[in-house]
C-alpha cells in the first residue's frame, strides 16, 4: 500500500490535531503513514509557507496528503484549505452546530485548548505533580491524607507511569507504594497505609511480562525470576481481595487506560488542562 | 447564563472525547459548563444506561446537555444518538470522508486511540519516563549522551513538569539541570553539560511569578526574594545568549506549549501514544 503523508496543523500546540487525527487513523488497519506535526501556525505568512511545504511533499507521492487541522483563525484556515490534500478541520465540522445550540458566536481565539496560563489551575496541576513525584515508590509518607489515590503493587507493575500520568494529565494527587516481600508473605498492606484501604488501588500484570521488565533492570536475578514474579503477583492478588482493594491487570492496557480505570473506580474528578 | 451540562462519552478512555469537546468549548467565552466524562461505554447495555442517566440530568435543566462522543461501535453509537441532548460524534463527522479518501473501510474497533499495548512502543515510552525521572534536577549525569534535550534554568522555572510531560506525552528523553549561583555568576553551564550546548534549552519566567512560586516553598527566604529572583533570571538570560542556547519565557505558557516549543526548536520527533 502506498504510504500516506499526514500533517497535524494547528495555531496552538498541535495536541488536539494529533489526538483527533490519530484517533481516526487507528481505524484504518494496515494504512502506512508518515506523520508530521506543525504547531503554532498562527499567521497568514506561516500558513502560506506550510501550504507550500505540504504541496511540495504532495508532489513526491502518488496519493494526496491527509491534513488534520484545528485552526481557529479564519484567515489562517482559509489559506490552509487551499492545500493540495484532504483538509479536515475540527472547527469546520463542529463549530457552527455548537454556535447554533449555544446561541452564541465563538471567539475564534487561537491556542486556547492547551495554551495560556490560568494561574490557579496551573498551580493546582503542578502541586499534583510535585506531590506525586514526592510520593513515588513510597519515598514519602508525609501528608498521605492529601492523596486522592494510593497505588499499590509489586515492583515494576506500572505504578510510577500511572501515578505521573494521573497527576500531569488529570491533576490527581497520587501516591504509590511497593508491596514488599514481607507485605506479600503476610498479606498485609505497608504499615503506613493501614486505615487508607479505601483510597488504595492495586495493579497486577502478566507474570512473564513482569519477568521481562525486571530482567531489563536486574538480569538473571532472583527478583527477575519467573517463580518470584508469579509468587508476588499471586500474593498481591490475594492481598487486594482480602482487604477489598480494587485492582486491574494492566498487562494489555496503556497508561491512559489504567489511569482512566483508576479514576472511574475511585470516582475521581477528571480535570483537563 | 444557564449552566450547560457537558458529557464526554467514549468506548475507550474518553481522552479524545475530552480533548475534542474542551477544544471546542474554549471558543465560547463565559459559557458555564459542568463536565462529566463517561469512559468505557462499550456495550449496548452500558449505552442504554448512560442515555437514561443523561436524559435524567437533562430534565433538571432548561437547556439540553452537550454530548461529545468518540464511539466507534455502530450499535453503541446508535443508542447514544437517541439521547435528549446535542450529540456530536467525531466518527460521524469524519470517518466517511476518510474512508472515501483512503479507499478502505474503517475497522470500527473500539479503544484504539489510547488503548492496547504495543509492547515496543510502551517500552520506549516507559524508558523515556524512567530516563527523565532519573535525570530530573541534575540528579544523575549518567548516560547524558542519550538525552534528546537538556533543560536548564534557575530553580522553579518549570523544568520538571516540562521534562515529565515531554517523556510521558511524546516519548522524549529529557534531562534537566538547575543553574546554580556559581553558574550564573560566571555565566557558565554546569561542568557536566559543557560540550552539550547544542542539546540544551533554557527557561526563564517572570521575576514576580518566580518570587511567588519560591515563597510557597521557602517563605521569606533570600532564595525567594524578588531581588534574588530578578538577578538569577537576568543572568540566566545572559548565559543562554552567550552560549547560543535557545530559550523561552514560560510565564504565560502551559506545560503543553513549553513542550511543543522545545520540540519544535530542537526538531524533535513528536511521538504519540
Image (cartoon, coloured by chain):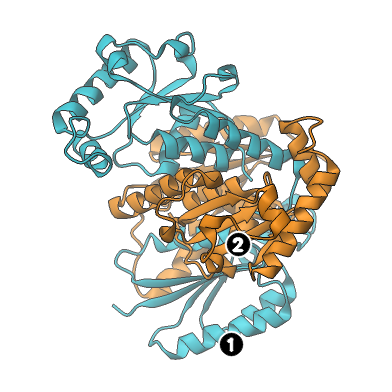
Chain colours: A orange, B cyan
Residue A37 spot, x, y in % from top left: 56, 38
Query: In front: B134, or B43?
Result: B134
Query: Which residue is depicted at the point 74% across and 64% down?
Result: A238
Residue A270 versus residue A56 in the image, above or below: below
Query: According to the image, label 2 marks what residue?
Result: A201
Badge 2: chain ID? A
Q: Quadrant of residue B131?
A: top right
Instruction: Using a 10 Å C-alpha cutoff, classify the residue at mark 2 as few (fewer than 14 neighbours), some (14 to 19) or many (20 or more).
Output: many
Q: Answer with left or right where residue A12 lies relative to residue A166.
A: left
Residue A62 spot, x, y in % from top left: 75, 36
Residue B139 spot, x, y in % from top left: 48, 26
Q: Answer with left or right where residue B144 lies relative to residue A145.
A: right
Foreground disc of the pair 2, 1: 2
Instruction: Using a 10 Å C-alpha cutoff, classify the residue at mark 1 as few (fewer than 14 neighbours), some (14 to 19) or many (20 or more).
Output: some
Query: According to the image, label 1 marks what residue?
Result: B52
Q: Quadrant of residue B121?
A: top right
Secondary structure state at the residue bearing disc 2:
strand
Badge 1: chain ID? B
- Distance, label 2 to label 1, CA atoms, is 29 Å
Tell me if residue A62 can be seen.
no
Residue B228 versus residue A94 in the image, above or below: above
Q: Outermost residue, left direction?
A: B227
Query: Which residue is depicted at the point 20% across and 41% down?
Result: B219
Query: Which residue is depicted at the point 25% across and 38% down?
Result: B214
Tell me if residue B225 can be seen.
yes
Residue A269 versus residue B160 in the image, above or below: below
Secondary structure state at the residue bearing disc 1:
helix
Amino acid at each position: 500500500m502506498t504510504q500516506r503523508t499526514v500533517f497535524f496543523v494547528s495555531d496552538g500546540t498541535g495536541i488536539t490535531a494529533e489526538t483527533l487525527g490519530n484517533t481516526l487513523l487507528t481505524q484504518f488497519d494496515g494504512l502506512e503513514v508518515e506523520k508530521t506535526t506543525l504547531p503554532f501556525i498562527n499567521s497568514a505568512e506561516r500558513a502560506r509557507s506550510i501550504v507550500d511545504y505540504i504541496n511540495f511533499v504532495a508532489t513526491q507521492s502518488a496519493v494526496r496528503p491527509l491534513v488534520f487541522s484545528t485552526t481557529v483563525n479564519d484567515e489562517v484556515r482559509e489559506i490552509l484549505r487551499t492545500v493540495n490534500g484532504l483538509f479536515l478541520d475540527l472547527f469546520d465540522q463542529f463549530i457552527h452546530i455548537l454556535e447554533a445550540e449555544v446561541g452564541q458566536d465563538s471567539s475564534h481565539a487561537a491556542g486556547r485548548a492547551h495554551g495560556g496560563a490560568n494561574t490557579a489551575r496551573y498551580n493546582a496541576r503542578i502541586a499534583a505533580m510535585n506531590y506525586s513525584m514526592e510520593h513515588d515508590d513510597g519515598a514519602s509518607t508525609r501528608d498521605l491524607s492529601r492523596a486522592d489515590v494510593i497505588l499499590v503493587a509489586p515492583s515494576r507493575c506500572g505504578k510510577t507511569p500511572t501515578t505521573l500520568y494521573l497527576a500531569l494529565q488529570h491533576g490527581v494527587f497520587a501516591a504509590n507504594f511497593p508491596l514488599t516481600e514481607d507485605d506479600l508473605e503476610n498479606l498485609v498492606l505497608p504499615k503506613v497505609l493501614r486505615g487508607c484501604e479505601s483510597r488504595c488501588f492495586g495493579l497486577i500484570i502478566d507474570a512473564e511480562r513482569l519477568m521481562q521488565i525486571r530482567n531489563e533492570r536486574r538480569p538473571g536475578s532472583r527478583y527477575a525470576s519467573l517463580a518470584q514474579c508469579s509468587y508476588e503477583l499471586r500474593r498481591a492478588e490475594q492481598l487486594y481481595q482480602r482487604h477489598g482493594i480494587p485492582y486491574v491487570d494492566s498487562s494489555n492496557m496503556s497508561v491512559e487506560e489504567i489511569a482512566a480505570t483508576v479514576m472511574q473506580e475511585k470516582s475521581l474528578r477528571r480535570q483537563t488542562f
